[in-house]
Image (cartoon, grey):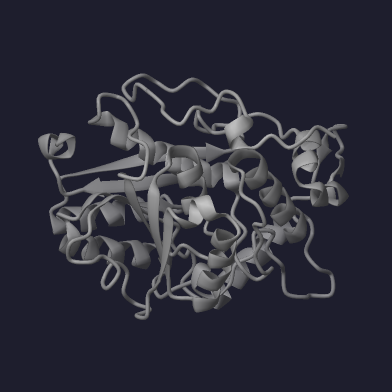
Amino acid sequence: MPACRCKAETPGYPMRHTPTPSTPLPASKSGLHPRNRQRGRYDFAQLIGCSPDLARFVARNAYGDDSIDFADPAAVRALNRALLKLNYGIAGWDLPPQYLCPPIPGRADYLHYLADLLAERHGGEIPTGGAVRVLDVGVGANCIYPLIGHGEYGWHFVGFDIDRDALACAQATLDANSAFADAIELRFQPTARAIFRGMIGERERFHLTLCNPPFHASLAEARAGSERKWRNLGKADPQGAAPRLNFGGHGAELHCPGGEEGFIRRMIAESADYSEQCLWFSSLVSKATTIPVAQRALRAVGAREHRVIEMAQGQKRSRILAWTYFDEDERRA
């Protein structure tokens, strides 16, 4: 197997990028952002060389290609661990099986599109380094956005969560990677229904906020969604056992009062109280029906501008909703 070549040694990934946001993005068979490191096929030989534990999950698929069983949570975690080690030099990433194991290509796309937003009023150049501050709403045990965002662009992050155990898991990853620990701060949100309140200090400023909100309105709804998924995959348990999720997740990661729509409406309402402290607020949006509801909420709070950025990963479709309270001149300044 080839030796592991981590980020600093891998050619073709400069820390500064000069996109032209007004130019249409080149087509990609995967639909991923042009800067996404996962756009091509996974090089499993290189990944295994970087993270040997992955080898036990890799086998030939029906097309004769090396792959993993993406319905196996342990295999997905092993792949993530290898991708983070290979592409960003992150060692020792792991998380308990009950926590959300995110698809890295889609999470990286979110960050790349937010970087394009910053470049629009920055001469077409993405600002990099620690002067750019990003707030991660619900950082989770995986800490994936701060890890990728700092690895790609050198940004500094504050991530918060209502789950102390999740924060402890994220902190363990940071403790094993000192270069990231210096750039990522974790905070506990003691008020479950609050979002920005108590997490943005009076004198703090952020260029971006990001969030992957809970999708479901209840645990029962989450379980019903899992059952549909496994039936569609033809892998429903004939004994009627509770379905598993290949990306895991539990509690506040999966559901909250009002589901995705309710969470985003609360986020928009609270964002108005911090309108001068954050340049761009944003959230992932899984349901297309959430967008018009969110747009009405944004008009109600007086947002100056909002964007809906479509994303695709294979057959999966999602979108980013971003909004700002600053006009163009203020954003440029």
Which image quadrant: the N terminus? top right
Of the pair 295 and 100, the residue shown nearer to us: 100
Could you tell whether 38 is left or right of 58 in the image? Answer: left
Can residue 315 be seen? no
Q: Is residue 170 above or below residue 80?
A: below
Seen at 26% across and 65% down, the residue is 200
Q: Quadrant of residue 275?
A: bottom left
Q: Is residue 134 above or below residue 129?
A: below
Of the pair 64 and 41, the residue shown nearer to us: 41
Q: Is residue 196 above or below residue 125?
A: below
Seen at 30% across and 31% down, the residue is 119
Can residue 185 be seen? yes
Could you tell whether 293 is left or right of 42 in the image? Answer: left
Could you tell whether 264 is left or right of 286 in the image? Answer: left
Of the pair 81 and 219, the residue shown nearer to us: 81
Seen at 37% across and 36% down, the residue is 128
Provide residue 82's location: percent of width, then percent of height. 70, 46
